């Protein structure tokens, strides 16, 4: 009986260990980084808090698959009550959801032979309209890759209030119908325009191909595979207790555990391709480690090596635009990369709420800066802060 108990205990502990992945911790010196140089990030983030740009933040620095720096700053909440920030605080990732929750899952379908990047979107979304030349009547179909690189010509956003007034909410079908028939702003691949609608469309393609909601697919085949136990959509229960609130609402409450983005929140009810993922710094550090290791971490693989290389490389036909497949390499939005990491191979993304995720595969360094600048009101800016932090981290790499 005692032997059976010990066997069951060992199995239980093994399961807990497998489901609770954390990166090995090392000192900056062990990771080839100068600790005195790296510690300058504390001053920069503290100054941002003191100036009122952000109430608090969590910073994680990863080098070659190991956690080098993990620190919480300021407050998790300042309204309706004050609560200190902790390193396990969960943030609304906003548009960092685009690569983390949508693009990685989508690229799995590509490497499984279920979708081609060169396929027309209309193959998967019935009634999805092409771009039409108003002078000649010539039609050009929007392709899957155009969505991933924001070169489709779809408008930046959808008129949420208009769609709600006409069709009610939540109403994902009404949103996709509007996207399918709305005016295209330019010929596909002829220009760059950042658009949340690209990733809502990718979400719908994935859902039509797999028969699963995006939120369920990404959790099962990406987050759970890597042991990202604090990463989900529409957090509830124990996870909700760890979530940092965002914006104060008209009724005096704060948005908590509901995605801040209106399309994702109101029309898509939290299951959305453009926003909706909630996560913490340690989980994103695990993802960063996998992305720096050919798509695999601790024996668990989410993408093949060549898939990841393709995903993070800017396609030749849109080289000047600086966007790879779901990631930002060197577009005008990539200021969070700073000035010192590799100018072309570094990839990452930012989120409206104040989040940032970047990976330099050349130096094998990742910087994860999570803040909630929209708490309690939407007024702070983190554009300069992100770049300053990235520069300090890059400047601390000495080996």
Image (cartoon, grey):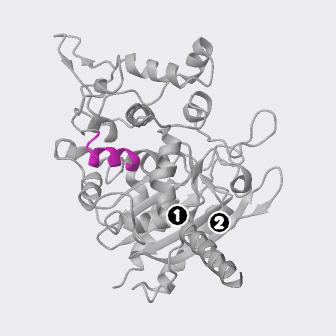
- Residue 312 shows which numbered tag? none
State which quarter of the image contains the N terminus.
bottom right
In the rendered image, the vertical position of residue 129 relative to residue 214, given as above or below: above
Which residue is at a point 22% across and 45% down the rendered structure image? Answer: 320
Which residue is under mark 1?
227
Q: Which residues are magenta?
A: 104-114
Say if the magenta span includes residue 107: yes
Q: Is residue 370 left or right of residue 135?
A: right
In the rendered image, the vertical position of residue 325 relative to residue 42, given as above or below: above
Q: Is residue 188 left or right of residue 127?
A: left
Which residue is under mark 2?
88
Disc 2 element: loop
Q: Is residue 338 visible?
A: no
Q: Is residue 306 left or right of residue 163?
A: left
Which residue is at a point 45% across and 18% down the rendered structure image? Answer: 178
Categorize mark 1 by other alpha carbons within 10 Å: few (<14), some (14-19), many (20+): many
Question: Measured from the top left, where is residue 160 in percent x and y?
Answer: 56, 23
Question: Measured from the top left, where is residue 101 in percent x and y?
Answer: 47, 48
């Amino acid at each position: 009986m005692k032997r059976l108990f010990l066997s069951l205990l060992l199995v239980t502990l093994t399961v807990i260990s497998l489901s609770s992945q954390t990166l090995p911790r090392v000192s900056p010196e062990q990771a080839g980084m100068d600790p005195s140089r790296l510690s300058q990030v504390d001053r920069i983030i503290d100054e941002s808090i003191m100036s009122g740009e952000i109430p608090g933040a969590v910073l994680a620095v990863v080098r070659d698959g190991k956690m080098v720096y993990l620190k919480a700053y300021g407050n998790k909440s300042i309204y309706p009550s004050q609560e200190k920030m902790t390193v396990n605080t969960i943030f609304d990732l906003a548009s960092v959801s685009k690569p983390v929750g949508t693009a990685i899952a989508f690229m799995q379908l590509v490497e499984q032979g279920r979708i081609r990047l060169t396929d027309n979107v209309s193959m998967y979304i019935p009634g999805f309209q092409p771009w039409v030349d108003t002078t000649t009547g010539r039609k050009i179909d929007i392709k899957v890759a155009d969505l991933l690189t924001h070169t489709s010509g779809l408008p930046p956003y959808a008129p949420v209030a208009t769609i709600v007034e006409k069709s009610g909410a939540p109403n994902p079908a009404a949103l996709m119908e509007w996207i399918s028939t709305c005016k295209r702003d330019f010929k596909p691949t002829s220009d760059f325009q950042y658009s949340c609608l690209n990733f809502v469309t990718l979400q719908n393609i994935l859902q039509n191909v797999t028969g699963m909601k995006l939120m369920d697919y990404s959790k099962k085949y990406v987050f759970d595979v890597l042991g990202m136990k604090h990463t989900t959509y529409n957090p509830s229960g124990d996870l909700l207790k760890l979530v940092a609130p965002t914006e104060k609402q008209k009724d005096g409450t704060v948005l908590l555990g509901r995605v801040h983005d209106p399309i994702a929140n109101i029309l898509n009810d939290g299951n959305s391709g453009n926003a909706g993922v909630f996560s913490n710094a340690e989980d994103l550090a695990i993802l960063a480690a996998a992305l720096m290791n050919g798509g695999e971490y601790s024996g668990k693989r989410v993408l093949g090596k060549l898939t990841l290389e393709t995903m993070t490389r800017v396609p030749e036909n849109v080289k000047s635009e600086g966007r790879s497949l779901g990631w930002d390499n060197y577009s005008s939005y990539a200021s969070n990369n700073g000035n010192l990491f590799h100018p072309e191979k570094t990839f990452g993304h930012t989120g409206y709420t104040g989040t940032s995720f970047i990976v330099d595969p050349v130096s094998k360094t990742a910087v994860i800066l999570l803040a909630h600048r929209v708490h309690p009101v939407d007024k702070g800016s983190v554009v300069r802060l992100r770049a300053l932090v990235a520069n300090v981290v890059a400047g601390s790499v000495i080996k």
